[in-house]
């Protein structure tokens, strides 16, 4: 398999290139050392089957059989998150790392149902995350949005109750978007149409997205677009199974939030090179590159950019386009988009003579 070099200049360019992240689960940024620290702080006994050390975690994380195998572990991992400060610490560690990777705007997922069912208060989760969002902006100048996800393995009635509980946070704009995650099959997006409709009617400015086409086939992507009215798709790698859908994504500029390293770790593809990224370029389908659950999948946003570079060997202009597509697909203000685009041009001008 061809491998392209990612030399020092290219690595610096990819780091400095202003990046937007649209697909990262805050609970999936729980690094093993913080996980064990919080377990101790909160006196949580992890099950016997759970890895006992940071090294054991790394071994386990290199051997996920599929999405469900990962999720079984992920829900146990998040059981160490109890207090508002835990949620703050978790999100702050992510924002710090994202900033050092040159990520200037993050739209981050969280899974309240994974906490509510353990007796944690919605407000502890949202206040902790929101405090970190605000502090990240103050400290790093980076912008961010919270996206609440519904767990699709739970009934839609549970989703409706969760939306009700989160209403005051949507009202204030503390939570900006709605997503859908967890075990994709056999839970098609159509099951959650009422949840999406209810929220959108109450808060017309809310951003809508859903995981689709990671393990589910292309019909899951059509389901998200047609029944949930999402304006983006998380993963979406199976879109290429259907030509009409690819045409629709291109014509309507629907962005796919791709997660290359995640797809390898969860055995969606054997190698990043298998992702149909050339096809997206050819057909003018916008995509962004994201880390998904970086503590579990071996890399943050920059690692994902580098992994794609070593397989596809893009030039500066293609990277510029990827960065601009990510900005255009973001849910930030036009003013922020223009600021970010200007920064992209500055970085490209700086590196053009070097690459
Ligand atoms: N897919 C679906 N649900 C998830 C994921 C994922 O990659 N990560 C956390 N929840
Ligand atoms: Zn995801």
Image (cartoon, rainbow, N blue to C red):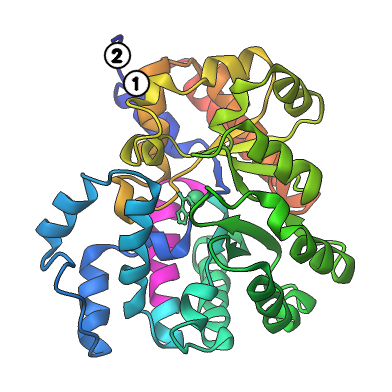
Secondary structure beneath dot 1 equals helix
Q: Is residue 209 visible?
A: no
Mark with earlier residue (2, 1):
2
Is residue 228 toward the left or the right of residue 274 in the image?
Answer: right
Is residue 154 toward the left or the right of residue 114 in the image?
Answer: right
Secondary structure beneath dot 2 equals loop
Residue annotated with mark 2: 3
Which quarter of the figure is the C terminus placed in? top left
Viewer-proximal residue among 291 and 264 = 264
Above-or-below relation of 354 to 292: above
| Mark 2 to mark 1 CA distance (whole Å) | 5 Å
Is residue 133 toward the left or the right of residue 333 in the image?
Answer: left
Q: Main secondary structure of the magenta part?
A: helix
Viewer-proximal residue among 119 and 129 = 119
Q: Quadrant of residue 88?
A: bottom left
Within 8 Å of ligand 1, the CB of disc 2?
Answer: no
Callout 2 touching callout 1 (CB < 8 Å):
yes
Magenta run includes residue 96: yes
Is residue 80 toward the left or the right of residue 49 in the image?
Answer: right
* Coordinates of residue 158 in the picture (x, y in percent): 64, 75
Residue annotated with mark 1: 310
* Coordinates of residue 119 in the picture (x, y in percent): 47, 89
Magenta stretch: give its range.
88-103
For image coordinates 26% across by 72% down, the residue present is: 35
For image coordinates 43% across by 46% down, the residue present is: 291
């Amino acid at each position: 398999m061809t491998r392209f070099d990612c030399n020092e200049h290219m690595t610096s360019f990819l780091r400095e290139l202003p990046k937007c992240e649209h697909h990262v689960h805050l609970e999936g940024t729980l690094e093993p050392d913080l996980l064990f620290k919080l377990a101790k702080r909160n006196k949580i006994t992890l099950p016997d089957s759970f890895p006992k050390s940071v090294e054991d975690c790394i071994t386990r994380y290199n051997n996920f059989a599929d999405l469900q195998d990962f999720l079984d572990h992920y829900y146990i991992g998040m059981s160490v998150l109890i207090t508002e400060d835990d949620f703050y610490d978790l999100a702050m560690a992510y924002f710090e790392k994202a900033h050092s990777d040159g990520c200037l705007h993050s739209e981050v997922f969280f899974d309240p149902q994974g906490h509510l069912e353990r007796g944690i208060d919605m407000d502890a989760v949202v206040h902790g995350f929101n405090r970190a969002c605000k502090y990240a902006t103050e400290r790093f100048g980076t912008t961010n949005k919270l996206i609440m996800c519904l767990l699709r393995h739970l009934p839609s009635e549970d989703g409706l109750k969760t939306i009700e509980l989160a209403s005051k946070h949507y009202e204030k704009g503390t939570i900006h978007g709605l997503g859908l995650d967890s075990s994709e099959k056999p839970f098609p997006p159509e099951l959650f149409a009422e949840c999406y409709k209810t929220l959108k009617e109450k808060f017309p400015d809310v951003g809508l997205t859903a995981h689709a086409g990671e393990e589910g086939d292309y019909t899951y992507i059509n389901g998200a677009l047609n029944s949930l009215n999402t304006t983006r798709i998380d993963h979406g790698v199976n879109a290429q199974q259907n030509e009409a859908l690819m045409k629709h994504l291109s014509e309507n500029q629907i962005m796919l939030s791709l997660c290359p390293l995640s797809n390898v770790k969860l055995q969606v593809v054997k190698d990043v090179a298998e992702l149909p990224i050339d096809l997206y370029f050819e057909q003018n389908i916008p995509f962004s590159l994201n880390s998904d659950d970086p503590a579990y999948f071996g890399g943050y946003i920059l690692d994902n950019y580098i992994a794609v570079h070593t397989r596809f060997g893009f030039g500066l202009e293609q990277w510029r386009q990827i960065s601009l597509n990510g900005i255009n697909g973001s849910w930030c203000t036009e003013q922020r988009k223009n600021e970010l685009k200007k920064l992209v041009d500055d970085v490209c001008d700086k590196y053009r003579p070097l690459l």
